[in-house]
Amino acid sequence: MQLLKGKHIVLGITGSIAAYKACTLIRLLIKAGAEVQVVITPAGKEFITPLTLSTLTGKPVVSEFFDRRDGSWHSHVDLGQWADLMLVAPASASTIAKMAHGVADNMLITTYLSMKAPVMLAPAMDLDMYAHPATQANLDILRGYGNIVIEAASGELASHLVGKGRMEEPETILRHVIHKLATTNELAGRRILITAGPTYERLDPVRYIGNFSTGKMGLALAEACALRGAEVQLVAGPVQLATFHPNIHRTNVESAQQMYEAATQLFPTCEAAILCAAVADFTPASCADEKIKRKGPISLALEPTHDIAAALGQMKTASQRLVGFALETQNEMGNAREKLTRKNLDLIVLNTLRDEGAGFGHDTNKVTILTPNGQQAFPLKSKAEVAHDIISSLCDILD
Ligand code: C5P
C-alpha cells in the first residue's frame, strides 16, 4: 500500500557503520511510494558509495556544495523547499552535535538549517557515546527545535559491546515516517475499540486451548484507524506483533474472560468497536493447579465464554457502531447475516478459509463486507489494504 505516494524525502546519511542499513530504508521508502533524495556527509561516503545510493534512489547523491567538474551549485535551499520530510538515518554523534549547534560545514547541515519540512533523526553510535551527557543534551536541543528523535535501540553494536546505540531497524523507521506523513484527521477526535488476536484458555500451568489467529488483521485495523487520526483502544490477546503508532493504546490480555472485561469497560468511552479477535467460545471449567499427568484418556469439561460481540451489541447506544467478523467454512453468507442480526452489529466482515490467502496467519485477506441492507465483495488484498476498506465502510456509517 503506497502510503507515501508523492511524498518527497531528503535522506541524510552520516559516517556510521549503520549507513549500510540506509539501502534497505531507501527501498522501503520507495516501495511505499516516496521519492528519495540522498544527502551524504564526507564521512558517510567512507561507509557506503554514492553509486549504490543513486542507483537505489534513481537520483544523483548530493554531497558537495558544488560540482567540481562544472562548478554547478547544489542548492540546499531548493532541497529545503522540495522536501516533505528530512530524515537523518543514521545520525552520528558528530552530525547530531553540528545540527544542534548549527555548524554548517557540510551539505547535510546546510540542508538541515534550510529545511522547511519536519526533521526526523535516527541516532547510531557506540553505547558510551550515546549515553554521554553531551550527546543526550544535543538530542534534547534538537527535540526542543521540534525535531523527532527515533531513539536508538539496544543490542549488539559494531564494537561487539551490547547496549543502547543501534540505529532502529529500517522497518520501524518507515513506520515513524508513515505516521508523520500519512496520518490524516478524518477520524480525529473519535475513539475506536479494537479486539485482536487469539485468546488462551488455561488447562493447567503449562497448557492452554488456543487457536491459529496471529493478530495481523486486528493490528492492521488498529494502525489504519490511528493513521486516520482516531484514538485506538486495542485489546490484544497473546500476539507477538508490536504496535507503533502513538494513537494506539494497547491492553494485553490472555483469556476470553479478560478480553470481555477490558472490552466492556472500554466500549462506553468509544464511538465504535471492531471485534476482530478470535475469541475462544469455550474455556475449561477449571484450571488444574498441577500439570495434568498422562494416564489414559481424559475428558475435559468446557464452559461457554462470554460472547463479547453480543454483549457490546446489547450495550450499544444509538450513536455507537459495531463491526464484527465472521470466519466461515460453509454457508458463509447465511452464517454472516445471521451473526449480523443476532449480535446487533452494523457491519460484518466475512472471510472464508475456502479462499486461498485469506484467514489466519496470511499477510493477505479476501473479504465481503455486509450491512443490514447490502454487501460488497473485495478482491484479495494485503491486510493493510483490507483494513483501510473496512475503516472506509465504518466511516460511512459513523454518527
Ligand atoms: O460467533 P462467531 O465467533 O463466529 O462470531 C465472530 C464475531 O464475534 C467476531 O467479530 C468475534 O470477534 C466476535 N466474538 C466475540 N466473542 C466471542 C466470540 C466471538 O466477540 N466469545
Image: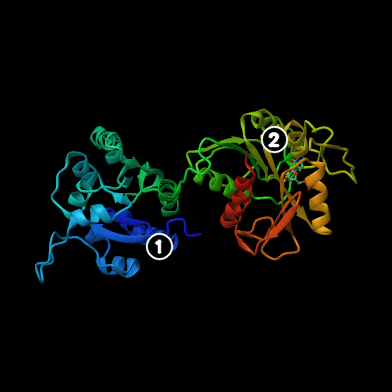
Q: Give above or below for 287 relative to 15.
A: above
Residue 385 locus on image (x, y percent): 57, 57
Point out the quarter of the image occupied by ligand 1.
top right
Residue 312 locus on image (x, y percent): 73, 35
Q: Give above or below for 102 relative to 50.
A: above
Q: Nearer the viewer, residue 214 or 184?
A: 184
Assign a secondary structure to mark 2: helix
The residue wearing badge 2 is: 259
Q: Left or right of 117: which side holds 265?
A: right
Residue 219 locus on image (x, y percent): 59, 47
- Label 2 CB, ligand 1: below 8 Å? yes
The residue wearing badge 1 is: 30
Residue density around tag 2, few if under 14, some if 14–19, many if 20 or more, within 10 Å? many
Q: Left or right of 364: which side holds 122?
A: left
Please tell me in which quadrant of the rendered image residue 61 appears. bottom left
Three-letter amino acid code of the residue under disc 2: Met
Residue 169 locus on image (x, y percent): 42, 51
Q: Quadrant of the C terminus?
A: top right
Three-letter amino acid code of the residue under disc 1: Ile
Q: Nearer the viewer, residue 57 or 7?
A: 7
Please tell me in which quadrant of the rendered image residue 378 appears. bottom right
Q: Give above or below for 361 relative to 260.
A: below
Please tell me in which quadrant of the rendered image residue 313 appears. top right
Real-space Cα separation, disc 1 to disc 2, in angstroms? 39 Å
Q: Left or right of 46: which side holds 299?
A: right
Q: Give above or below for 219 relative to 351.
A: above
Foreground mark, 1 or 2, reads 1
Q: Residue at x 52, y 35 (%)?
A: 189
Q: Residue at x 83, y 55 (%)?
A: 334
Residue 204 in sight: no
